[in-house]
Image: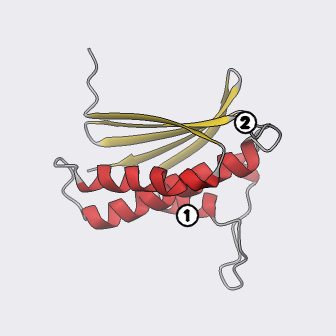
């Protein structure tokens, strides 16, 4: 028996034309969370941004060597926790070595991990089998 309130799994080709789909899934989920008493519009915007940024990073950095590869995204909500995992097959990176962006002179690119860390409660990046997994957690209380 599964105790998740919501479980979504999406597997997309490594093509940026699917980013709107991924972002809108997060947005729609946030707007339908009856259990969440906070600002649903803000959460919807944050999930759209976080899912889009995580997916574009997986597409751009995780699968550049194999354009026929896929990115897998899972979204699980259990009680008061939203858990997002983005899987790719690239060489990976050290999450802790990603520098903070210069907010006084922002550049195009390089803001995704900063946004994800700022908007969510926990961000980890691990290797599991033949996949890299970016795990993002948001507490919904």
Q: Is residue 135 above or below residue 111?
A: above
Is residue 130 visible in the rendered image? The answer is yes
Taking the spot 64% from the left edge, 35% from the top edge, the residue there is 70
Taking the spot 76% from the left edge, 44% from the top edge, the residue there is 93
**Secondary structure state at the residue bearing disc 2:** loop
Taking the spot 55% from the left edge, 47% from the top edge, the residue there is 123
Closest to the observer: 23 or 137? 23
- Place of residue 122 in the rendered image (x, y in percent of width and height, measured from the top left): 50, 47
- Place of residue 33 in the rendered image (x, y in percent of width and height, measured from the top left): 22, 49
Q: What whole-number distance in Å separates the C-alpha atoms at marks 2 and 1? A: 28 Å
Q: Left or right of 15: which side holds 8? A: left
**Secondary structure state at the residue bearing disc 1:** helix
Q: Which of the 4 image quadrants contains residue 83?
A: top left
- Place of residue 17 in the rendered image (x, y in percent of width and height, measured from the top left): 58, 55
Count of numbered badges drawn on the protein: 2
Tag 2 residue: 68
- Name the residue at the bottom extreme: 104
Closest to the observer: 21 or 49? 21
Tag 1 residue: 115
């Amino acid at each position: 028996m599964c105790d998740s309130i919501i479980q979504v799994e999406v597997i997309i080709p490594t093509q940026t034309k699917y980013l709107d789909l991924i972002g809108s899934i997060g947005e729609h989920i946030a707007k339908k969370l009856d259990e969440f008493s906070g600002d649903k519009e803000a959460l919807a915007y944050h999930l759209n941004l976080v899912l889009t940024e995580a997916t574009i990073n997986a597409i751009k950095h995780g699968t550049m060597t194999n354009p026929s590869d896929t990115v897998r995204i899972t979204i699980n909500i259990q009680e008061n926790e939203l858990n997002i995992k983005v899987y790719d097959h690239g060489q990976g990176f050290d999450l802790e070595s990603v520098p903070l962006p210069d907010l006084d002179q922002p550049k195009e690119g390089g803001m995704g991990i900063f946004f994800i860390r700022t908007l969510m409660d926990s961000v980890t990046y691990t290797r599991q089998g033949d996949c890299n997994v970016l795990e993002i957690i948001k507490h919904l209380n």
